[in-house]
Amino acid sequence: MVKKLLFFICYFFAYFANAQTALPQLDLHSSLAIPINETAIEDSSTSSSLVAFGFGGGFTVPVLENSPLRLGISFRYMWLGSKSREFFLTDEEGYTYELESSVKGSMSPLHIIARVDAMNYSDFPVLPYLGGFVGIRFFGTNHKLTIDYQDGSEPIIDNNRKVNVTSSYGFELGLHIRISEGILLDFRYEHAYGGWAKYVDLTSVKIDNNGNATYDRLETRTDVAMFTLGIAIMLKS
């Protein structure tokens, strides 16, 4: 199912990116996600584990020329937090090296967007918009070991990744403010419902003196409120 959805998103993007009558819009933004799952809020550790911050972008085009209805896609990479420790150790041959052991969590929403936005046929400087979205969210957990002999050679890096995928859908309310021709400030609130997923519980992370890490992964629903600030750029042909 995930492969079929990713194929559809790629096809969707390619089709509209080549539309001859479309006036594309590129969005670049930063977002803060806060959990709205009632179960998560009751447990402070679970609630804090779903707080995320990150960056992303989107691409939308009108369905018809000068239409207020736009379709597009968006992607974000958001950090759920990390814990790390650094050590100076000696290997079997007597060489001293620096070892960094870290555990990091991430959330990456990938959405198809349908949006009603008046910017294409109105010159008014302040333009509200609303829309809906559907897609998937990737939850990643990575235990990373970095060995650096500090002799000018490249550090040795070992990643142990775990990825969980769940559904993601909801609605958005936003505001565009024109600051120059073709460039707008973008303020947006998104109410994103998510399915059940596993993600790292940072309060459970323990790293021993050899750099070995143990941690738990929480499994809850993944409903979040996302607050976004960015810019929208009209890409005229």
Image (spheres, rainbow, N blue to C red):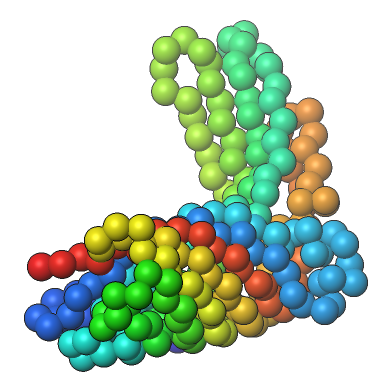
Quarter of the N terminus within the rendering = bottom left
Tell me: residue 236, above or below residue 103: below
Residue at 45% across, 81% down: 129
In screen coordinates, is 47 left or right of 83?
right
Residue 188 appears in the picture as rendered: yes
Say which of 199 and 66 sits in front.
Answer: 66
Please state the horizontal and vertical placement of residue 76, each as a whole percent of the image: 47, 62
In screen coordinates, is 153 left or right of 95?
left
Residue at 75% across, 59% down: 49
In screen coordinates, is 94 left or right of 8?
right
Residue at 71% across, 41% down: 83
Residue at 68% across, 77% down: 223
Please state the horizontal and vertical placement of residue 66, each as a whole percent of the image: 22, 86
In screen coordinates, is 145 left or right of 29?
right
Location of residue 44 by image quarter: bottom right
Say which of 169 and 104 sits in front.
Answer: 169
Location of residue 12 by image quarter: bottom left
